[in-house]
Image: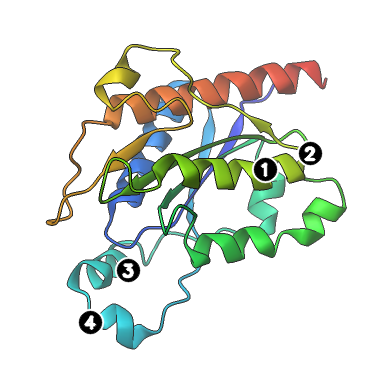
């Protein structure tokens, strides 16, 4: 059987979710997956980005990261989304990316994709779980199989114990409060493992 193909699709304004996407890539590769790390297109005006140093730096740091496409989702056996929280939901950039997948959804190409998600917010109770649940609602419409981390490893408790997906609080200086690297890597490995089972079952 060929290796699981994983797309890690992120949106990042301050660099947090880009870092989480890179940790997910490391964890998935350790589990034997073939991985693409992909960003969603930025929709904000350049003038707004230029007024925020952290945002501007992240756009520069990710300029060589390929933008995710429908073809990437078709290619993937599994998808991990990493996105900040906006009022208990995903940002408009991530939402638009999901919204323009009607073509592959209508043709059944999102069915049985194994998906998982991660998020960040300024406060531990700033909508992190609601964001993951809102994203998973879309995944149910896709006919995808959600591979939430649950409480499948003690490493999750050190990261705040979120069973829906790894979530991290970010302080005023843009630094991650919880140590979530281990939880992200565990979640990535679990996603790859579930995708392996699905792939074998479909053969």
What residue do we see at 37% from left, 58% from top?
12
What residue do we see at 50% from left, 66% from top?
93
Secondary element type, mark 3: helix
The reply to whether callout 2 and callout 1 are in contact (CB within 8 Å) is no
**Observer able to see residue 59:** yes
Distance Cα–Cα, label 1 vs label 3: 27 Å
**Observer able to see residue 32:** no
Disc assigned to residue 139: 1
Tell me if 56 is positioned left or right of 133 in this view.
left
Secondary element type, mark 4: loop
* Callout in the foreground (3, 4): 4
Work out whether mark 4 precedes mark 2 in sequence or the reverse, and give the earlier one: 4
Work out whether mark 1 precedes mark 4 in sequence or the reverse, and give the earlier one: 4
Tell me if 130 is positioned left or right of 12 in this view.
right
Residue toward you, 39 or 172: 172
* Callout in the foreground (1, 3): 1
Secondary element type, mark 2: loop
Neighbours of disc 3 within 10 Å: few (<14), some (14-19), many (20+): some
Neighbours of disc 2 within 10 Å: few (<14), some (14-19), many (20+): some
The relative height of residue 98 versus residue 193 in the rendered view (above or below) is: below
The reply to whether callout 1 and callout 4 are in contact (CB within 8 Å) is no
Q: Quadrant of residue 3?
A: top right
The image position of residue 41, as x and y in percent, is 50, 68
* Callout in the foreground (2, 3): 2
The image position of residue 114, as x and y in percent, is 65, 32
Q: Which residue is mark 3?
A: 59
* Callout in the foreground (2, 1): 1
Distance Cα–Cα, label 2 vs label 3: 32 Å
Work out whether mark 1 precedes mark 3 in sequence or the reverse, and give the earlier one: 3
Q: Which residue is mark 2?
A: 111
Q: Which residue is mark 4?
A: 51
């Amino acid at each position: 059987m060929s290796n699981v193909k994983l797309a890690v699709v992120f949106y990042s304004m301050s660099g947090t979710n880009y870092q989480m996407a890179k940790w997910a890539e490391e964890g998935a590769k350790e589990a034997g997956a073939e991985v693409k790390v992909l960003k969603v297109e930025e929709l904000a005006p350049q003038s707004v980005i230029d007024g925020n140093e952290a945002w501007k730096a992240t756009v520069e740091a990710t300029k060589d990261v390929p933008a995710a496409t429908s073809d990437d989702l078709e290619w993937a056996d599994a998808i991990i989304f990493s996105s900040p929280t906006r009022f208990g939901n995903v940002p408009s950039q991530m939402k638009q990316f999901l919204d323009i997948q009607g073509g592959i959804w209508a043709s059944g190409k999102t069915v049985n994709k194994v998906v998982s998600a991660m998020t960040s917010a300024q406060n531990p109770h700033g909508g992190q779980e609601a964001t993951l649940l809102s994203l998973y609602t879309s995944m149910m419409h896709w006919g995808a199989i959600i591979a939430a981390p649950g409480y499948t490893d003690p490493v999750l408790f050190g990261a705040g114990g979120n069973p829906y997906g790894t979530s991290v609080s970010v302080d005023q200086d843009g630094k991650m409060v919880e140590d979530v690297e281990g939880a992200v890597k565990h979640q990535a490995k679990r996603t790859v493992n579930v995708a392996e089972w699905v792939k074998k079952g479909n053969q």
